[in-house]
């Protein structure tokens, strides 16, 4: 499998009134062609900013360094104009809140035609035809009615389908889905995820799925990266991760999922997410870790491969493989 | 706004009785201004021709609103005054919008240094009482209608800049703007397609209401002798000249004063309803 996107040592700081927030602390990540890569972690761990960094849609107080190699080009070195050619065309994104992701003042028709005409140089008639095709592709059959509707006349599921249709107008090679189902109810969630997988088979793009729902990850992803406080702490194939989690944080996350089969109490992770203005030295997880060793307070662990399809950033493991004592 | 949107807004304006009243008054005013030469009983007197035999006559069937100190028909002059007032209202507000809206959009959307510079400039303008600033500029530029309009517009635009900047800041954080960016839409297009249309409603309302205030302030400038010059018929000027006669010849300042009052109220009534229509939280009531 060839690599589509590779993020190397990505650092992101935000200059704020209260000081510098060290939001991403050397993120390393590879997404292969034709795969669904899940990025999980709790709120504020840097999942969304990672995706926004890929598209370079960060606020002006952001400082970004490292490399984001996409189809052989370092996105961080491109001009704003070159970046606009990538956005929507090569890398598309769908967002969390479909309810407000469409401009409330314009009909779906206007908004879709606008987007389609942006990169394809075709006239309005053809753009409209293309819009209808796209709507059909996302299983919205009543295309005429939908095109003539305003966003508030459509349901959340329909709007998210429209967002997906718009994101796919140019057959991008990477679709970033930032918690695409969080705002939807469970049945619609399932439909939307299935739709994304279905379209992925049809159009052959990769998906970067950002979520905090491990259930969603288990069902949809091929590989998973676990993020904690601006670091990727563990990357593995989805089965490997669920069956053989290595990093104490991943173990904690999995232990915190309620299991309806056993009536045992939940085991929450102790402590809180550290402040990114003043993150702990060494491994950012050490204050909450039951297995912390002196070295964890001193040195930041690097992501090392534990087995063929499993990498972990933790001092408890050497590259030869080892286990939590 | 689209055509059907405008039709919808008009329908609601008509359904609400007070705003209908305001609308009728404004339309009446426009018609009066357009057809002044045909509506005014004494067009020459309205343009300034004296008629000294009939000085300061009380209202009668010949002169409905009485005559002024030069014997000119007050009704004719009030009718001609509608022209000046409407020109002033439209010119001041549109000039203000023309300067204020782009600056506000730029400040709100760009943020950072651009925002700080633009907003500090508006702060300077806003730190003067508006009429005082207009007075100052008017004195500097010299008397006359055009200069009064420029003076008012210059003291007017910062309000729109502030208003639309606030809107732009909140709208640029909306998910649909983020979506537009993620799809590679350029900043200018985002401002034109997403920020401006979603930010403009309160400005339309403010602008409508300001038409009344603009007339009022232009009248104030004329009253102080800085705006329209005699013998042109202008409501503010007429009130100014008539104030000395108020005790004995009440009709002379009263009718132009009433004209100002009614016009200002009409614009406010329409503006109020417009606000309710364009505010999405209040909109449902009308649909």
Image (cartoon, rainbow, N blue to C red):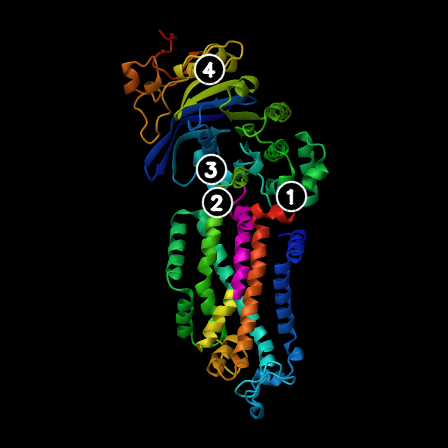
Judging by the rendered image, the residue that carries numbered circle 1 is A107
- How much space separates mark 1 and mark 3, taking CA atoms? 26 Å
Tags 1 and 3 on a common chain: yes
Horizontal arrangement in the rendering, residue A131 relative to residue A274 (left or right): right
Eye-nearest disc, 4 or 3: 4
Tags 4 and 3 on a common chain: yes
- How much space separates mark 2 and mark 4, taking CA atoms? 38 Å
Q: Residue A159 appears at what percent x and percent y?
A: 62, 35
Judging by the rendered image, the residue that carries numbered circle 2 is B170
Segment tinted magenta in the rendering: B185-212
Q: Is residue A234 above or below residue A56?
A: above
Nearer-the-camera pick, A177 or A256 = A256
Chain letter for mark 3, please.
Answer: A
Tags 2 and 1 on a common chain: no
Tags 2 and 3 on a common chain: no
Judging by the rendered image, the residue that carries numbered circle 3 is A57
Tags 4 and 1 on a common chain: yes
At a point 48% along the width and 76% down the height, the residue shown is B144
- Upstream in sequence: badge 1 or badge 3: 3
Nearer-the-camera pick, B183 or A277 = A277
Q: Residues within 10 Å of mark 1 (few under 14, many from 20)?
A: some
Q: Residue A245 appears at what percent x and percent y?
A: 44, 12
- How much space separates mark 2 and mark 1, taking CA atoms? 22 Å
Q: Secondary structure at mark 2?
A: helix
Q: Secondary structure at mark 1?
A: loop
Asked whether residue A57 is drawn in magenta, I would say no
Eye-nearest disc, 2 or 3: 2
Judging by the rendered image, the residue that carries numbered circle 4 is A254
Chain letter for mark 1, please.
Answer: A
- How much space separates mark 4 and mark 3, taking CA atoms? 32 Å
């Amino acid at each position: 499998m060839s690599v589509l996107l590779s993020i190397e040592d990505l650092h992101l700081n935000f200059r704020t009134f209260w000081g510098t927030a060290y939001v991403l602390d050397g993120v390393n990540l590879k997404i292969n062609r034709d795969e669904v890569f899940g990025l999980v972690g709790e709120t504020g761990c840097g999942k969304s900013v990672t995706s926004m960094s890929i598209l370079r849609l960060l606020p002006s107080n952001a400082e970004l360094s490292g490399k984001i190699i996409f189809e052989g080009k370092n996105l961080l070195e491109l001009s704003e104009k070159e970046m606009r050619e990538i956005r929507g065309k090569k890398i598309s994104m769908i967002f969390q809140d479909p309810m407000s992701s469409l401009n409330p003042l314009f009909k779906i028709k206007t908004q879709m035609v606008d987007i389609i005409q942006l990169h394809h140089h075709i006239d309005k008639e053809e753009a409209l035809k293309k819009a209808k095709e796209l709507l059909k592709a996302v299983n919205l059959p009543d295309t005429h009615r939908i095109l003539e509707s305003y966003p508030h006349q459509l349901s959340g599921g329909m709007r998210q389908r429209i967002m997906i249709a718009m994101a796919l107008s140019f057959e991008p090679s990477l679709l970033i889905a930032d918690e695409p189902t969080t705002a939807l109810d469970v049945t619609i969630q399932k439909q939307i995820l299935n739709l994304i997988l279905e379209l992925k088979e049809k159009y052959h793009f990769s998906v970067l799925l950002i979520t905090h729902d491990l259930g969603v990850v288990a069902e949809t992803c091929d590989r998973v990266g676990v993020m904690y406080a601006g670091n990727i702490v563990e990357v593995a194939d989805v089965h490997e991760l669920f069956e053989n989690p290595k990093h104490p944080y991943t173990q904690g996350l999995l232990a915190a999922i309620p299991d309806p089969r056993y009536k045992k109490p939940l085991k929450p992770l102790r402590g809180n997410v550290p402040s990114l203005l003043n993150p702990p030295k060494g491994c950012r997880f050490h204050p909450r870790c039951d297995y912390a060793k002196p070295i964890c307070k001193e040195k930041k662990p690097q992501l090392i491969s534990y087995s063929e399809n499993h990498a972990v950033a933790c001092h408890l493991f050497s590259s030869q493989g080892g286990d939590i004592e | 706004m689209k055509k059907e949107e405008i039709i919808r807004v008009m329908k609601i304006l008509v359904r609400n009785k007070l705003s209908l009243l305001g609308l009728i008054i404004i339309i009446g005013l426009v018609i009066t201004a357009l057809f002044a030469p045909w509506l005014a009983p004494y067009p020459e007197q309205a343009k300034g021709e004296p008629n000294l035999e009939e000085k300061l006559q009380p209202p009668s069937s010949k002169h409905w609103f009485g005559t002024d100190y030069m014997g000119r028909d007050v009704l004719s002059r009030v009718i001609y005054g509608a022209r000046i007032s409407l020109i002033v209202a439209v010119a001041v507000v549109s000039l203000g919008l023309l300067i204020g809206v782009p600056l506000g959009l730029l400040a709100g959307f760009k943020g950072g240094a651009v925002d700080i510079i633009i907003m500090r400039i508006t702060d300077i303008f806003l730190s003067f009482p508006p009429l005082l600033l207009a007075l100052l500029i008017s004195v500097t530029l010299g008397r006359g209608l055009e200069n009064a309009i420029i003076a008012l517009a210059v003291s007017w635009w910062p309000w729109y800049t502030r208003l639309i900047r606030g809107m732009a800041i909140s709208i640029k954080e909306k998910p649909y703007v983020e979506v537009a960016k993620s799809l590679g839409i350029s900043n200018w297009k985002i401002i034109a397609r997403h920020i401006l249309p979603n930010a403009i409603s309160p400005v339309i309302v403010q602008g409508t209401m300001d038409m009344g205030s603009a007339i009022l302030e232009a009248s104030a400038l004329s009253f102080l002798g800085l705006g329209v010059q005699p013998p042109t018929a202008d409501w503010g000027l007429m009130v100014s000249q008539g104030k000395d006669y108020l005790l004995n010849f009440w009709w002379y300042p009263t009718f132009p004063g009433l004209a100002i009052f009614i016009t200002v109220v009409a614009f406010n009534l329409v503006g109020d309803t417009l606000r309710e229509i364009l505010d999405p939280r209040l909109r449902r009531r009308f649909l």
